[in-house]
Image (cartoon, grey):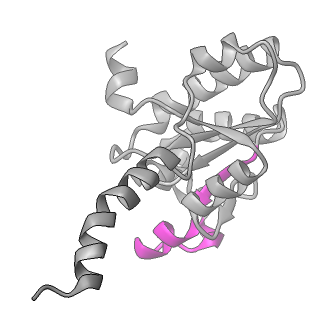
């Protein structure tokens, strides 16, 4: 004879799954630049996310961020923004890599100093690859975790804007 609790559980399992599905994701999907520019009212803030396997991705990603930030500020003056880079590309921002990556260091420094956009890298990922926080210049904040840093901004109601991957940006 089947156990009544097991039978009840089996009957209610689809209901529980349906309720969870209706509840939706815990984190909102990232917005696009066009969606943000089309908004009549600015969000509380925008956090740009760069994560790419291409070590040279910042060569195209940072100019994209700089231009996107200018467009957003023109549309929504005073909009707070931040940048979190937490993939293979972030290692180009190390102080010892500046000689071969002068342009991206200048853009990162300009975003931080001139535009008031903090630039964060991921200490956890850096540590996995043998890079210490001291390996990054003062204009780059080494956050304990890139994903956690993004969630912290989202907790402040910032909208996440994922920067297109370098392969996509290079193809444009």
Let me know if residue 168 appears in the view: yes
Is residue 161 or residue 137 the one in the foreground? 161
Q: Residue at x 56, y 74 (%)?
A: 132
Describe residue 112's horizontal placement relative to residue 13 as left or right.
right
Residue placed most toward the observer, 17 or 152: 17
Q: Position of residue 149 (x, y in %)?
A: 65, 58
Q: Quadrant of residue 14?
A: bottom left
Q: Is residue 111 left or right of residue 166?
A: right
| Residue 38: quarter of image | top right
Rendered view: 81 above or below 70: below
User: x and y percent of residue 52 in the render?
Assistant: 39, 44
> Which image quarter is the C terminus in?
top left
68 sits left or right of 101 in the view: right
Range shown magenta: 118-135
Does the stretch in magenta take in 102?
no
Residue visible at 64% across and 56% down in the picture:
151
- Residue occupying the point 44% across, 48% down: 89
Q: Residue furthest left?
A: 1
- Give above or below for 16 relative to 65: below
Residue appearing at x 75%, y 44% in the figure = 157
Q: Is residue 98 above or below residue 126?
A: above
Q: Quadrant of the N terminus?
A: bottom left
**Residue 168's spot in the image, x, y percent?**
34, 24
**Is 51 or 97 nearer to us in this picture?**
51
Residue 165 sits in which quadrant?
top left
Q: Would residue 141 be found to the left or right of residue 12 on screen?
A: right
């Amino acid at each position: 004879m089947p156990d009544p609790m097991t039978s009840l559980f089996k009957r209610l399992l689809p209901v529980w799954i349906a309720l969870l599905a209706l509840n939706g994701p815990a984190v909102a999907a990232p917005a696009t630049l066009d969606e943000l520019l089309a908004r009549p009212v600015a969000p509380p803030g925008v956090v740009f996310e760069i994560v790419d396997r291409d070590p040279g991705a910042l060569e195209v990603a940072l100019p994209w961020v700089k231009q996107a930030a200018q467009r957003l500020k023109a549309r929504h003056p005073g909009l707070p923004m931040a940048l979190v880079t937490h993939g293979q590309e972030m290692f180009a921002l190390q102080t010892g890599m500046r000689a071969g990556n002068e342009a991206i260091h200048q853009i990162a420094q300009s975003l931080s100093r001139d535009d008031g956009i903090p630039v964060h890298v991921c200490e956890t990922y850096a540590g996995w690859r043998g890079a210490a926080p001291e390996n990054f210049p003062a204009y780059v904040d080494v956050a304990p975790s890139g994903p956690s840093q993004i969630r912290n901004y989202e907790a402040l109601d910032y909208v996440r804007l994922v920067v297109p991957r370098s392969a996509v940006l290079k193809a444009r």
